[in-house]
Image (cartoon, rainbow, N blue to C red):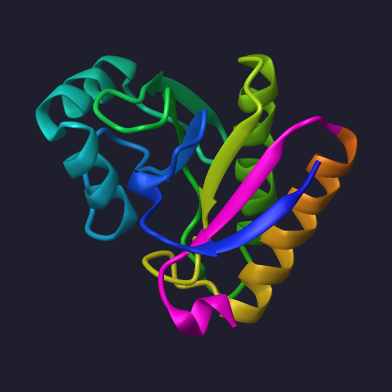
Amino acid sequence: MPLYIVRDNIAKMRVDAIVNLANTWPEVDNGIESIIYGAAGYNELLRTRKRVGVIHKGKAVVTSGFRLPALSIIHTVAAKWDGGNWDEEKILRQCIRTSLDEVVNLDYETAAIPFYSDGILGFPKNIAIDIVLEEIRSFVNDNDITVYLVVYDNEDLE
């Protein structure tokens, strides 16, 4: 199935699941996560996320989409870039794979993934985009789903 790259607000995507770049602990950072929480219903989603508890790096947890047009939110935790010496790339790959595995496990057909890791996580853009595109392409070649890679601005779109 296809991979599309779109410039949009991920919280407005009409897909089965959106992927949220979450914190290990149930707290909300600025950026994509705060946009998702705001659109979904901040207090309700945070209460649910607190019940979930800790999410370990590279793992994924599914919650309801609440007020989003998406049915579910898949929360995954990546590593902050620290020069590439602490398995940051491996963890980012694992985040993408485990998130997309959840999409398939839920028998969903569509997912939106933010182009993450170059923002709050500090990944160099060229490294992040190579990893993200490689992992998504590999996954959609083997699975019957459509994935939207959602970018924030024109610079990321290019």
* Residue 149 shown in magenta: yes
In this orientation, does residue 58 appear? no
Q: Quadrant of residue 107?
A: top right
In this orientation, does residue 10 appear? yes
For the point 69% across and 27% down, the residue is 101
- Report whether 55 appears left or right of 45: right
Q: Quadrant of residue 6?
A: bottom right
Start-end of magenta stretch = 143-158
Front position in the image: 20 or 18: 18
Q: Quadrant of the N terminus?
A: top right
Front position in the image: 158 or 74: 158
| Number of numbered discs visible in the structure rendering | 0
For the point 69% across and 50% down, the residue is 93
For the point 49% across and 84% down, the residue is 155
Seen in the picture, residue 73 relative to 123 is either above or below; the reply is: above
Q: Residue placed farthest to the right in the image?
A: 142
- Report whether 54 appears left or right of 4: left
For the point 24% across and 28% down, the residue is 67
Q: Residue placed farthest to the left in the image?
A: 43
- Report whether 61 appears left or right of 141: left
- Report whether 15 appears left or right of 53: right
Q: Quadrant of the C terminus?
A: bottom right
